[in-house]
Amino acid sequence: MKKKILVIPGDGIGQEVTSCAKAVLEQIAAEKGYTFTFDEALMGHAAIEATGDPLPAATLDKAKASDAILFGAVGHAKYDNDPTLKVRPENGLLAIRKGLGLYANLRPIVLFEELLDASSIKADVLKGTDILFFRELTGDAYFGEKIRTADYSSDLMIYHRFEVERIAVKAFEAARSRRKKLCSVDKANVLESSRLWRNVVQEVAAHYPDVETTHLFADTAAMQLIKNPRQFDVILTTNIFGDLLTDEASQIAGSMGMLASASVGDGAGFYEPVHGSAYDIAGQNKANPLAAILSAALMLDISFGMKAEANHILQAVKQVLKDGWRTGDIASAATDKSRILGTKEMGEQVLQMIRASAVSKQEQLQN
Ligand code: NAD
């Protein structure tokens, strides 16, 4: 099995966490005898500094020629503190999503039992939560016409039928393979673009009578997500509401540092932790690399169909957490201080666990 993987570390902690995830992919390839070849490219602030462009053409070309992309994060304080800057790191991310035709962002909210105490939500509310978000990526106010004058501003919220249809089909298919429940989130009470969204979702739902379909307004969904997260299976939503709700849902998983995501379309898949460049902790070996490592597992599962290998990574992460190892963001008052690790050391723990479980599987086969 040969695969070409492009690594785009981006900015801030992106560099630190993608190097841990890449090491995990290398370990899996070595164990299985697969050939994963890696290339690297610039994006975001790092790319602006080097080329003036947040998404250099060379990066997009390399991405198009790859089987999958492992991405870190983009963003830098310089741009966040100066809204007048026209060339911005995030433009690189929007452009690569567009360039690769990535229209669906999948974000599993998986609750690790071991981290129940790391969340600010009560454990008995959280227990058993297992949600898969489908966030639309190419439409909405992020891509509509933008106007800014001294006294006026406007972001046009646009949705086309085909954009809603193609992601709805993916979400209903996923619901079918899970608990057969899909909740579509919009603001059809006030937004015309949401009315089209709801109509199209209803039409697609008619082809999936085995899936229980519900609709919620985004404000109610935000409230229900905290009140009773267990009620949700698949959540299908627009670009902007998905952006907000998935960050809220990150608190169910305990930390942004635990949440992986996959962006898919018709070509190469794009795998990234949900968190940003976290420049407040960048370069300090403090970032949690588990979201990036779990994103690599999603790559194996979704892009390469390697379900067993993806599960191997997931089980290794679970065992590391069960053994009490934590990064600072997921440590609690109950954590043994000697078990709080830096980024590199947490990555190394996962690698060791993957190696150890592969060896014990080999021994079982020989006995
Ligand atoms: P952020 O996700 O970078 O950080 C939010 C908070 O969570 C920070 O306190 C940070 O230290 C912490 N955090 C995030 N990831 C962590 C990890 N792996 N381990 C431990 N702690 C972690 O969000 P922000 O502070 O709002 O944004 C910082 C920059 O990142 C901005 O420039 C923003 O535009 C950008 N951003 C990029 C992406 C992306 O590239 N996909 C996503 C969100 C934000």
Image: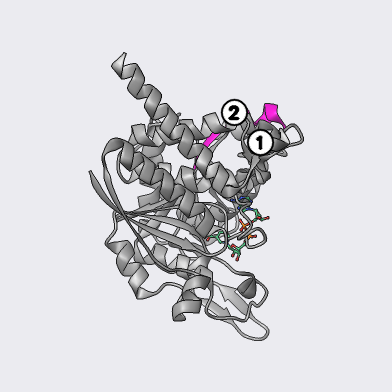
Q: Which residues are magenta?
A: 122-132
The outermost residue toward the left is 1
Residue shown at 68% from the left, 45% from the top: 328
Verify CB contact (< 8 Å) between mark 2 and mark 1: yes
The numbered mark at residue 339 is: 1
Q: Quadrant of the C terminus?
A: top left
The numbered mark at residue 28 is: none
Is residue 183 visible from the viewing direction of this image?
no
Q: Is residue 367 left or right of 271 when viewed as pictured?
A: left
Q: Is residue 302 above or below residue 192?
A: above
In what element is the residue under mark 1?
helix
Identify the amino acid type marked 1. Arg
Residue 257 within the segment the image draws in magenta:
no
Q: Position of residue 271 (x, y in %)?
A: 42, 52
Identify the amino acid type marked 2. Asp
Asked if the beta carbon under badge 1 is closer than 8 A to the nearest atom of ligand 1, the reply is: no
Is residue 77 visible from the viewing direction of this image?
yes
The numbered mark at residue 323 is: 2
Residue shown at 35% from the left, 74% from the top: 57
Q: Residues within 10 Å of mark 1 (few under 14, many from 20)?
A: some
Q: Position of residue 50 (x, y in %)?
A: 46, 78
Residue 124 within the segment the image draws in magenta:
yes
The outermost residue toward the right is 333
Q: Is residue 125 above or below residue 133?
A: above
Q: Residues within 10 Å of mark 2 (few under 14, many from 20)?
A: few
Judged from the image, the quadrant occupied by ligand 1 is bottom right
Residue shown at 34% from the left, 72% from the top: 58
Snapshot quadrant of residue 53 = bottom left
Q: Is residue 236 above or below residue 312?
A: below
Q: Position of residue 278 (x, y in %)?
A: 62, 59
